[in-house]
Image (tube, rainbow, N blue to C red):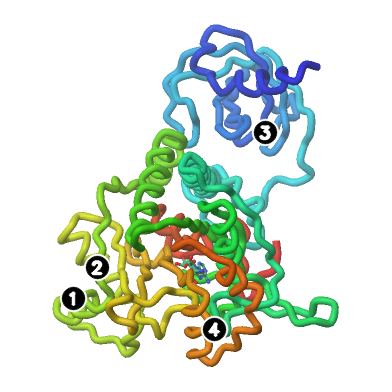
């Protein structure tokens, strides 16, 4: 078999519209059978989309049922289809021959052909590999995949090198208690919270780097925005003139990714009625300014004065939407007290850092900022925080031997998906979520 044959075979059906009048072979899984007297509509899930086929005869005699893998030979004809899940809607396949190549032992325990999957979240996650067969559930992850593709292509076009950092590490980068520890051949080890150290190392090598990979957080609370394993989209780059370069890079990356989405997955965006934001510029407000706005405009005065509470993120989004017609807002200059040791302090006010969060539709989706690149400054900041720089020698060595001014960010893929698709819980935007009680599937 020629290497190109498999590629040709699979790409043929994708252009069904171009094949009207032609005989084709279609391989797929039966999604739904609607038998009528003397004929039947068989919706077939063929490599990703659901195609309508028409069988003339008594379907009951063929052994075809939902979940069967079938090979169909038939002719493509024009049609006007209404079924929300069918794509394309302007043609169908008239079956000449249908053969069952595999048949399920049992039918699915719930109906995946209904307009909306009406099962509870527990069952949805317990049987995720089945519930995802529902077109609307599947669309979430098709969109997520396209988002990653758009982000990755932007970064590669802009000379970022994709790296792979270890997930078993000796020290956490982010501090705090939300770190999983483990026994590593008698030594204490952790599951990584972030590729922070490694991306900074790699700036010293490639200048621009990124990683899209899982990270782990031992969050003990069950919220609609936290999971214990998530996909972190990290980038880091050197030779920055100011930390605003990082904000601009993120805005350009999201703009590119959203444009890619609109071209790549229009069917899924339509199915889930997703409103993809049109990014022009993203306003940037300073942390203390935001606190003032919330107090003045919304009469809210939350207790934590060094961080933003979820309600404040919601309110500032509301404010920015009304004032600047933007669904995104950068919040800059977070207090030093709430930022990790590697964050660079603001030269004008050491109580603040040149760091930021990006809020999208009321939820923080990104943290980023400029990092300390100078060895002495880094060691002094660590010591000032009661950390022992010797424990982090493997990290500070990179600074000792020289790093350029640099910065970057971490963007939570599931939070981005959650806000983009407007789903209520981050777990619904996570293929196989891990929370305090869920380890399977
Ligand atoms: P931070 O800890 O703020 O920053 O995380 C960055 C982004 O990751 C997402 N996120 C989460 N998503 C789901 N569940 C969680 N438990 C969770 N925790 C965080 C959020 C958040 O904005 N090293 C820095 C990034 C950097 O400065 O480059 C870091 O990890 O979307």
Q: Quadrant of residue 28?
A: top right
Question: Label 1 neighbourhood size at 10 Å, few (<14), some (14-19), many (20+)?
Answer: some
Q: In which quarter of the image is the N terminus?
A: top right
**Labels 1 & 4 near each other (Cβ < 8 A):** no
Query: Residue at the location (60% across, 84% down)?
Result: 389
Residue that mark 1 sits on: 293
Earlier in the chain: of badge 3 and badge 4, it is 3
Instruction: Indicate which disc residue 139 carries.
Output: none
Residue that mark 3 sits on: 29
Cα distance, mark 1 to mark 4?
A: 29 Å
**Labels 1 & 3 near each other (Cβ < 8 A):** no
**Labels 2 & 3 near each other (Cβ < 8 A):** no
Earlier in the chain: of badge 1 and badge 3, it is 3
Q: Quadrant of residue 290?
A: bottom left
Above or below: residue 141 compared with residue 185: above
x then y, percent, for residue 153: 50, 41
Provide the secondary structure element on which disc 3 rests: strand
Cα distance, mark 2 to mark 3?
A: 51 Å
x then y, percent, for residue 387: 56, 88
x then y, percent, for residue 417: 46, 55
Question: Label 4 neighbourhood size at 10 Å, few (<14), some (14-19), many (20+)?
Answer: few
Residue that mark 2 sits on: 285
**Labels 1 & 2 near each other (Cβ < 8 A):** yes
Above or below: residue 437 compared with residue 230: below
Earlier in the chain: of badge 2 and badge 4, it is 4
Instruction: Indicate which disc residue 176 carries.
Output: 4
Query: Residue at the location (41% across, 42% down)?
Result: 269
């Amino acid at each position: 078999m020629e290497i190109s044959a498999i590629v040709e075979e699979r790409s043929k059906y994708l252009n069904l519209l171009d094949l009207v009048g032609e005989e084709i072979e279609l391989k797929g899984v039966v999604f739904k059978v609607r038998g009528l007297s003397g004929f039947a509509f068989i919706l077939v899930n063929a490599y990703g989309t659901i195609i309508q086929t028409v069988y003339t005869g008594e379907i009951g005699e063929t052994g075809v049922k939902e979940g069967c893998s079938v090979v169909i030979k038939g002719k493509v004809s024009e049609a006007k289809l209404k079924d929300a899940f069918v794509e394309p809607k302007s043609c169908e396949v008239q079956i000449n021959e249908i053969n069952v190549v595999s048949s399920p032992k049992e039918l699915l325990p719930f109906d995946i052909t209904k307009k909306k999957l009406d099962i509870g979240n527990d069952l949805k996650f317990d049987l995720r590999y089945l519930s995802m067969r529902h077109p609307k559930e599947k669309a979430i992850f098709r969109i997520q995949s396209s988002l990653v593709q758009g982000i990755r292509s932007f970064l590669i076009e802009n000379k970022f090198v994709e790296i792979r950092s270890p997930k078993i590490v000796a020290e956490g980068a982010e501090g705090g208690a939300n770190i999983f520890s483990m026994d590593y051949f008698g030594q204490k080890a952790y599951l990584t919270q972030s590729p922070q150290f490694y991306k900074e190392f790699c700036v010293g090598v490639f200048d621009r780097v990124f990683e899209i990979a899982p990270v782990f957080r031992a969050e003990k609370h069950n919220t609609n925005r936290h999971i214990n394993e998530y996909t972190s989209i990290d980038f880091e780059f050197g030779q920055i003139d100011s930390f605003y370069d990082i904000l601009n890079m993120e805005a350009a990356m999201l703009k590119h990714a959203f444009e890619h989405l609109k071209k790549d997955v229009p069917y899924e965006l339509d199915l889930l009625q997703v409103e993809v934001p049109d990014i022009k510029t993203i306003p940037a407000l300073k942390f203390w300014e935001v606190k003032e706005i919330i107090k003045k405009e919304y009469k809210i005065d939350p207790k934590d004065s060094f961080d933003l509470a979820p309600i404040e993120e919601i309110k500032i989004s509301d404010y920015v939407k009304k004032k600047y017609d933007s669904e995104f807002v950068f919040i800059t200059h977070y207090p030093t007290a709430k930022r990790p040791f590697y964050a660079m302090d603001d030269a004008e006010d050491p109580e603040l850092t040149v760091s930021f969060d990006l809020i999208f539709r009321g939820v923080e989706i990104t943290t980023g900022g400029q990092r300390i690149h100078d060895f002495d400054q880094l060691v002094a900041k660590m010591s000032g925080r009661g950390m022992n720089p010797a424990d982090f020698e493997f990290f500070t060595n990179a600074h000792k031997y020289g790093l350029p001014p640099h910065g970057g960010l971490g963007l939570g893929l599931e939070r981005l998906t959650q806000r983009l698709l407007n789903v209520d819980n981050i777990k619904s935007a996570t293929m196989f979520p891990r929370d305090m009680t869920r380890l399977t599937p």
